[in-house]
Amino acid sequence: MSDQLALFDKVRPEPEGLRYAADFVSPAIEQELILGIQTLPLQPFQFGEFEGKRRVASFGFRYDYDFHQLKRAEPIPAWLAEIVANVEMFVGPATRIQQVLCTEYGVGVGIGWHRDKPHFDEIFGLSLGSACKFRFRKRSGKTWDRFKIDAEPRSIYMMTGASRQIWEHSVPAVEAPRYSITFRTMTNGPDLRTPA
Ligand SMILES: O=C(O)CCC(=O)C(=O)O
């Protein structure tokens, strides 16, 4: 574990591999990032014939629910380069973020229970604009083990290990507009940021 990683507050009793750090970005950077997201051509999240209420833009890669395949997306834009580098540095120098997802949640919008696609490995999530309950659940016989963090604006969470591979996560409907930037490393993918 890198020295930087030790700066994440340990969440107890947590799903293994879950970390949370408050105040990862300043209020000024938060506003810049929100403005950046608001200027993107955000589209309702599509999964097959269904459409989610949250609006998203993917960079690096995107998962295509029609073809059940990972596809290349627009490259990560320059205005996100610094925050991507900061997340990589914070987690550890070997970290290579290759997928970025910008999401806008209007009031009353959330995200249902899921695990991220196996093409992605480690997941880091920056919360912007307003707080949310970030919930976890894992089957335990006929019931569920449950866990929750209050993800404050400007905070970051990290999901690796069991928190990412075994536990599902969801965000219930938010009470004020929330934005998130999800940063993902790839399980096996080509390193798009290394010239061929
Ligand atoms: O908004 C968030 O922090 C969570 C996003 C998420 O779980 C996803 O897009 O898969």
Image (cartoon, rainbow, N blue to C red):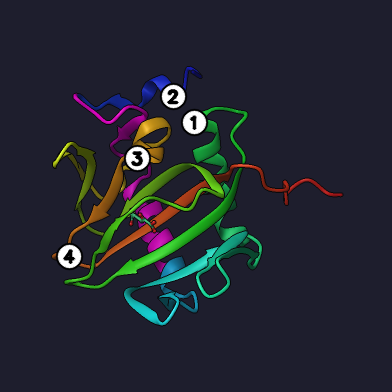
| Chain part drawn in magenta | 13-35
95 left or right, relative to 126: right
Q: Position of residue 99 (x, y in %)?
A: 57, 54
Q: Residue at x 49, y 74 (%)?
A: 40
Earlier sequence position, callout 3 versus callout 2:
2
Q: Residue at x 25, y 73 (%)?
A: 106
Earlier sequence position, callout 2 versus callout 4:
2
Whole-angstrom CA distance, mark 1 to mark 3, is 11 Å
For the residues bearing labels 1 and 2, Cβ distance under 8 angstroms = yes
Earlier sequence position, callout 1 versus callout 3:
1
Residue position marked by numbered label 1 in the rendering: 91
Instruction: Using the image, tell me which numbered label, if any, was put on residue 167.
Output: none
Whole-angstrom CA distance, mark 3 to mark 2, is 11 Å
Q: Label 3: few (<14), some or many (≥20) within 10 Å? A: many
Whole-angstrom CA distance, mark 4 to mark 3, is 19 Å
Whole-angstrom CA distance, mark 4 to mark 1, is 29 Å
Earlier sequence position, callout 4 versus callout 1:
1
Q: Position of residue 51 (x, y in %)?
A: 36, 79
Q: Residue at x 34, y 36 (%)?
A: 163
Instruction: Using the image, tell me which numbered label, if any, was put on residue 5.
Output: 2
Q: Position of residue 179 (x, y in %)?
A: 33, 62
Q: Secondary structure at mark 4?
A: loop
Whole-angstrom CA distance, mark 1 to mark 2, is 5 Å
Residue 62 occupies quadrant: bottom right
